[in-house]
Image (cartoon, rainbow, N blue to C red):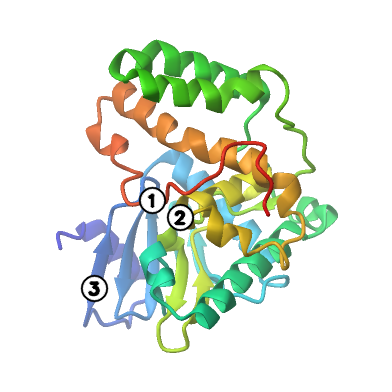
Amino acid sequence: MNIPASYLEKIRTVYPHISFDRLDFNRDGMVNDVVVVNRQLVCRFAKTDWGKKALLQEAKVLEVVQNHLVLEVPRFEHLEKGFASYRFIEGEPLSRNTLLKLSKSSQARIVSQLARFHHQLHSIPNEVLVSAGVSESDTVRSREHWLQLYDRVKEILFPHLWHHQQTWINELFAPLVAGELGLSYTPVLIHGDLAVYHILFDPISESLSGAIDFGTAGLGDPACDLAVLLSNYGENIVRGMKSDYPALPNIIDRARFWMGTLELQWALSAIEYNDISLSLAHISLAREVQPLGMPLG
């Protein structure tokens, strides 16, 4: 497993009586390395200075959401600069294939859970968040940011793309350039990165068991969270959230646009940082998203 000795020493220091009967090591994350001890304790080690700051922000967020969410979330029992630990939450990643293989009734139950989770998260009163010291999410983007992204895509990516791909990108950004895409929103608490491996699924009860990794959580645009759901599961599934997430029709176009930019952002990073693995980040994600302006039905 090649777990750094410094990680194990830190765990031993904080938990001097712990036994290492089973160790699972995950270093896939861009912000944290994770050591799971005996499937009982999750220990996260920040990889960067930014990651260390993110852990402190996450601690503030988790203190708040525990009082507002039905779905189980981590409860930090130890936190220091660059290191945090919490009790293991049982469950496996909720992939699109996993969801689609379930019965219609189980699918409906999980989609309802996803909708209620987001509704509860996005409905936490702003004064509660400000009082807890929760700051803006790093995912926040302005119209100027999106226009600059479009310019970079045309300059850096277009020379590598076929004509039909360039056409798709131009069509994606056209409502933004024309000022037809509404970007105004009331900031709410967002997760910011609810990828399939951050949504935990219990295969026995066929229901959600938890949500983890609130490292990018903060005040931001709810469309960001909906965009991640679109990329995880596709629009047909997200459309099923409408009854339990009534704000969906007002957010869907921003979410569609945001989702469309995800692959472009990763591709740009791959070229700019000369790291091909970044360009592969969205392999396996859903592509079933309607053009901007289409009704939810």
Q: Is residue 138 visible?
A: no
Q: Which residue is mark 3?
A: 23
Mark 2 → mark 3, Cα distance in angstroms? 29 Å
Sequence-first tag of 2 and 3: 3
Q: Which residue is mark 1?
A: 285
Q: Which mark is residue 232?
A: 2
| Mark whose residue sits in front, 1 or 3 | 1
- CB within 8 Å, label 1 to label 3: no
Mark 2 → mark 1, Cα distance in angstroms? 6 Å
Q: Residue drawn 65% across and 48% down?
A: 218
Residue 28's spot in the image, x, y percent?
29, 52
| Location of the N terminus (image quadrant) | bottom left
Mark 1 → mark 3, Cα distance in angstroms? 29 Å
Sequence-first tag of 1 and 3: 3
Q: Residue drawn 58% across and 41% down?
A: 256
Q: Which mark is residue 174?
A: none
Specify whether 253 is left or right of 100.
right
| Mark whose residue sits in front, 2 or 3 | 2
Q: Residue drawn 36% across and 44% down?
A: 282
Q: Secondary structure at mark 1?
A: loop
